[in-house]
Image (cartoon, helix red, strand yellow):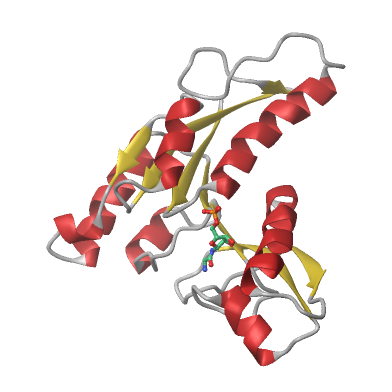
Amino acid sequence: FFKIVVLASGNGSNFQAIVDQLQRRILADTDGAPVLAPVAGTGTPPVMGALVFDVALMITDVPGAPVIQRAWSRGVPTAVLPYDAYESIEAHDAHLIDAVQESHADLVVMAGYMRLVTPAFVRAFAGRLINVHPALLPSFKGTKAIADALEYGVKVTGVTVHYVEEEMDSGPIIAQEAVRVLQGDTVDSLAERIHAVEHELL
Ligand code: GAR
């Protein structure tokens, strides 16, 4: 098993893309032969080459976030760890580290996780912690990257997938793809095209 843990705070379209893309790849690799089972938590995980992928856990910090419903409907175990239930961010992340370690994660994906994780968390999963960001880093760091890029007036923005280091939205870049800003774009219209690229790139 190659176990993937996803951290997400909101809508969860990237979480869904990870789960659904793994299934689609397996179908493609097997010429559509019916070896496919739902990802994670429901019995047989999909097989890709010699690797068996399992989206072992989705962790969110936001009770009621739409990503929870997406996880449930795909049989992915879910943990909800709201920050206000802890004395400090360090206490929260100590629990977060435990939850990820208990799931034996090979890869931790921050897919729309809107909180800065602590240095302890970054150290615990160094080299297997990645993030998707809706801009061409190092431009437009932060949680409003799409709106910030539009407001700045750039003609090209994009998507970055990168290893996570302690400083916000920093770390070695794994993949990047550009997205053109079109005349008349709104945050919503630009976000729609950026999300589509995120789902493929991730
Ligand atoms: C995505 O666009 C992701 O890149 C962004 O939040 C969105 C989550 O969408 N992340 C950040 O801005 C992190 N700095 P989703 O919940 O539908 O996957």
Residue 121 falls left or right of residue 70: left
Q: Is residue 12 above or below residue 29?
A: below
Depicted 49 relative to depicted 94: above or below: above
- Taking depth in this image into account, of 76 and 161 the one nearest to the observer is 76
Residue positioned most to the front: 184
Q: Nearer the viewer, residue 95 or 132?
A: 132
- x and y, in percent, of residue 197 in the image: 74, 56
**In this image, 118 relative to 95: left or right?**
right
Where is residue 92? Give x, y as percent: 23, 57
Total marks placed:
0
In this image, 31 relative to 197: left or right?
right
Looking at the image, which residue is at 45% across and 44% down? 67
Q: Residue furthest right?
A: 31
The answer to whether one can see residue 60 in this image is yes
**The image quadrant in which ligand 1 is located:** bottom right
Q: Residue lying farthest left? A: 87
- Quadrant of the image occupied by residue 117: bottom left
Q: Residue at x 63, y 63 (%)?
A: 162
Q: Is residue 139 visible?
A: no
Q: Which part of the image, by quadrant, shows the N terminus?
A: top right
Residue sitting farthest toward the bottom: 152
Residue 142, x across and y down, in percent: 50, 77
Q: Position of residue 102 (x, y in %)?
A: 33, 35
The residue that appears at 39% across and 68% down in the rendered structure is 116
Q: In the image shown, does 90 or 197 lie closer to the viewer?
A: 197
Residue 104's quadrant in the figure? top left
What residue lies at 59% left-to-right and 78% top-to-bottom?
Answer: 147
